[in-house]
């Protein structure tokens, strides 16, 4: 039975392909139903629309090809089929009789594994070979191009097949139980992201500052690739459009190759080779008598117990806390906003109880019995429970967790209350960091009902952000007053509200509204002419200079700001380039390509803002401030 090629056996390969013919036959049907038939239906519809004139239909056929490639390269199908094929091809590793019979053959284990592995890869490739061949033929028939793009996309799909199938084979080697193999495979592909999310949630529960768990930060983090399915899905998921990345819609033959987008798949291909070698070594040294064991290697059992206990304990503790207290992690703060130590101790106890329960559940699963009390691994138990307790103590004391970032790592600081302001100047940002640290250190209690919410959002140079939200006491001399005064005296007080282009000759405000809020009635007028908007803008600048308008609104109890100015800023691309605005500054202040304005900004106009109020009164008398119709959504 030995092949001339020492590490490949034709008989084993042929047996797999014939024994499991129904599996790849189903894949062929899926390929025709999902990849080929929808494309052919679309192409036929386009040809009919152009009454058989394929020359005029080429552009639409190209667009149709581009849209369908997003389905062709979606990693979810590869992810699911990889574990199905691995479990089917290596199904004998879950049955002791078959395991001993196969290993009694005069074939080396390395040859067995490689032959089975190649058979599985071929089964996974069959639907994609059919799919890509069909797409390339359609592109050639109708001169739609995209051949190079299709081949590059095929390489990406091939890299994903090798990666996911390699991971699937590896977990099948680690576990002697098919259901456990599937469970480990699914968990392993999202483990890093899951741990990160739970850590952020736990950190939020122990933090004085309110925070949201920012999924974008987690999914785009430096180590997001440790969760392969999540990482690759972001590269090729719903927001991705196949070969559109490399195609130029203005030309039928132009293909723009962006190698930076192929690099992650080159890395995936390299990782697949390493994982293949690991899986081969696991198969080679796996003992035949471990068939049926949840974990086939002794070194894997403490790893399984630790991961299951910590991940499962944290997960169930977070779910239980949220369900029991309804408002979830917000209840870690008491009614007055003070740090509630008793509530924190409740969280610690809940976490520890859930971790201990999950540890014993993992022990029962490994030994397949409920009676584990006398034989469970006490050393591993003490390490897991002690490590978790140490982690929680460090969280409570603030030694670990999300910290206020260092000044050198910050690109922008956005402060939000009733309105929002954006800073890029290092000196201004450093002053707000000091105030933020003062809030964290003192953990202030608001006085009665006189409170105001404020959020510090630090946008870092690596593209991530850290946000800290607080409910603070207001009034003269409070920390809120210090924040407002710091904003009013900042070097970038105009830029923070209006952008760096606020002095530019082309700069202007759009959608300027004056909202009357005197407590008895509420009405809104808008500046109907460019002249009116310019007068209001000039008056606001004068009042900000004189300190009559607070650029950050942390309203004090008893103040009478009975007018509110709402507006949008307009900064075009030329101005943004001229004043060297960063990506987030552009997003905050300028009009995008579809001519859609940024979100509305707001300034409270108190009685102290004499210049602005005088101009508003004059424009009202002149009829240049018109009553806004609630049905009119866009009026400029």
Image: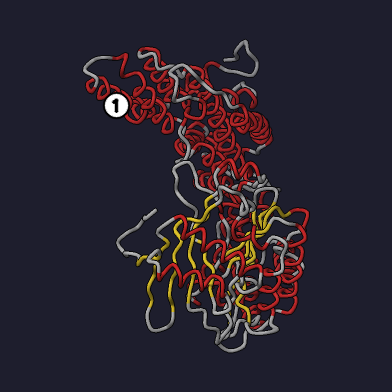
Q: Nearer the viewer, residue 136 or 485?
A: 485
Q: Residues within 10 Å of mark 1 (few under 14, many from 20)?
A: some
Q: Residue at x 51, y 34 (%)?
A: 86
> Residue 113, image x and y in percent?
60, 27
The answer to which image quadrant residue 7 occupies is top right
Q: Is residue 368 above or below residue 471?
A: above
Identify the secondary structure beneath mark 1. helix
Q: Which residue is mark 1?
A: 42
Task: Give the image location of residue 134, x and y in percent.
Answer: 38, 19
Camera-nearest residue between 157 and 114 = 157
Q: Residue furthest top?
A: 4
Figure colour scheme: secondary structure
Q: Residue at x 65, y 39 (%)?
A: 287
Q: Quadrant of the N terminus?
A: top right
Residue 476 visible in the current orientation? yes
Residue 99 sits in quarter? top right
Residue at 45 percent of width and 48 percent of height: 596
Q: Position of residue 495 (x, y in %)?
A: 64, 57
Left-right relation of 253 to 47: right
* Residue furthest out toward the bottom: 448
- Residue 372 x, y percent position in the rendering: 61, 64
Residue 204 seen in render: no
Residue at horizontal 50 percent and vertical 77 percent from the top: 325
């Amino acid at each position: 039975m030995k092949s001339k090629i020492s590490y490949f056996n034709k008989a084993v390969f042929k047996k797999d392909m014939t024994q499991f013919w129904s599996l790849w036959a189903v894949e062929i049907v899926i390929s025709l139903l999902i990849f080929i038939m929808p494309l052919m239906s679309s192409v036929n519809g386009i040809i009919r629309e152009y009454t058989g004139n394929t020359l005029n239909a080429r552009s639409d056929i190209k667009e149709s090809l581009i849209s369908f490639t997003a389905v062709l390269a979606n990693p979810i199908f590869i992810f699911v089929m990889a574990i199905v094929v691995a479990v089917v091809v290596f199904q004998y590793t879950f049955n002791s009789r078959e395991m001993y019979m196969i290993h009694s053959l005069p074939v080396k284990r390395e040859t067995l594994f490689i032959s089975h592995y190649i058979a599985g890869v071929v089964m996974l490739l069959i639907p994609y070979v059919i799919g890509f061949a069909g797409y390339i033929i359609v592109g050639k028939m109708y001169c739609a191009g995209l051949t190079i793009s299709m081949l590059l996309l095929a390489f990406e799909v091939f890299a994903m097949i090798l990666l996911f199938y390699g991971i699937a084979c590896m977990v099948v080697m680690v576990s002697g139980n098919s259901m456990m193999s599937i469970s480990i495979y699914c968990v392993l592909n999202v483990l890093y992201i899951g741990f990160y999310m739970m850590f952020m949630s736990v950190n939020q529960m122990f933090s004085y500052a309110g925070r949201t768990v920012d999924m974008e930060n987690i999914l785009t983090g430096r180590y997001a690739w440790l969760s392969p399915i999540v990482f690759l899905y972001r590269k090729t998921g719903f927001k991705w459009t196949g070969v559109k990345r490399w195609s130029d819609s203005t030309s039928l033959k132009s293909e723009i190759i962006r190698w930076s987008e192929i690099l992650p798949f080159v890395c995936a291909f390299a990782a697949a080779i390493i994982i293949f070698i690991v899986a081969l070594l696991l198969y080679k040294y796996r003992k035949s008598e471990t068939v049926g064991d949840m974990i086939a290697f002794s070194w894997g059992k403490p790893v399984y117990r630790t991961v299951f206990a910590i991940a499962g304990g944290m997960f169930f503790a977070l779910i239980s806390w949220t369900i029991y207290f309804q408002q979830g992690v917000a209840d870690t703060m008491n009614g007055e906003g003070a740090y509630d130590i008793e509530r924190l101790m409740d969280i610690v106890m809940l976490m520890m109880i859930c971790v201990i329960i999950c540890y014993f559940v993992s022990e029962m699963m490994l030994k397949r019995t409920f009676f584990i009390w006398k034989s469970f691994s006490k050393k591993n138990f003490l390490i897991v429970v002690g490590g978790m307790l140490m982690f929680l103590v460090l969280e409570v004391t603030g030694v670990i967790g999300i910290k206020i970032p260092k000044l050198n790592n910050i690109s922008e600081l956005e402060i939000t209350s009733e309105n929002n302001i954006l800073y890029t100047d290092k000196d201004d940002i450093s002053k707000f960091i000091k105030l933020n640290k003062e809030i964290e250190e003192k953990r202030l209690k608001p006085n009665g009902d006189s409170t105001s919410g404020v959020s510090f959002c630090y946008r870092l140079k690596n593209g991530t952000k850290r946000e800290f939200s607080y409910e603070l006491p207001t009034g003269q001399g409070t920390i809120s007053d210090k924040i407002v005064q710091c904003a009013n005296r900042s070097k970038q007080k105009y830029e923070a509200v209006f952008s760096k282009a606020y002095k530019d000759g082309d700069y202007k405000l759009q959608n300027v509204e004056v909202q009357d809020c005197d407590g008895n009635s509420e009405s809104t007028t808008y500046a109907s002419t460019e002249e009116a908007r310019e007068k209001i803008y000039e008056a606001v600048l004068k009042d900000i200079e004189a300190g009559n308008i607070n650029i950050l609104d942390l309203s004090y109890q008893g103040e009478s700001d009975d007018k509110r100015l709402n507006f949008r800023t307009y900064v075009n691309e030329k101005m943004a380039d001229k004043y060297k605005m960063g990506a987030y500054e552009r997003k905050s202040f300028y009009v995008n390509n579809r001519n859609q304005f940024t979100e509305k900004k707001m300034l409270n106009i108190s009685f102290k803002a004499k210049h602005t109020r005088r101009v508003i009164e004059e424009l009202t008398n002149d009829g240049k401030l018109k009553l806004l119709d609630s049905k009119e959504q866009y009026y400029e």
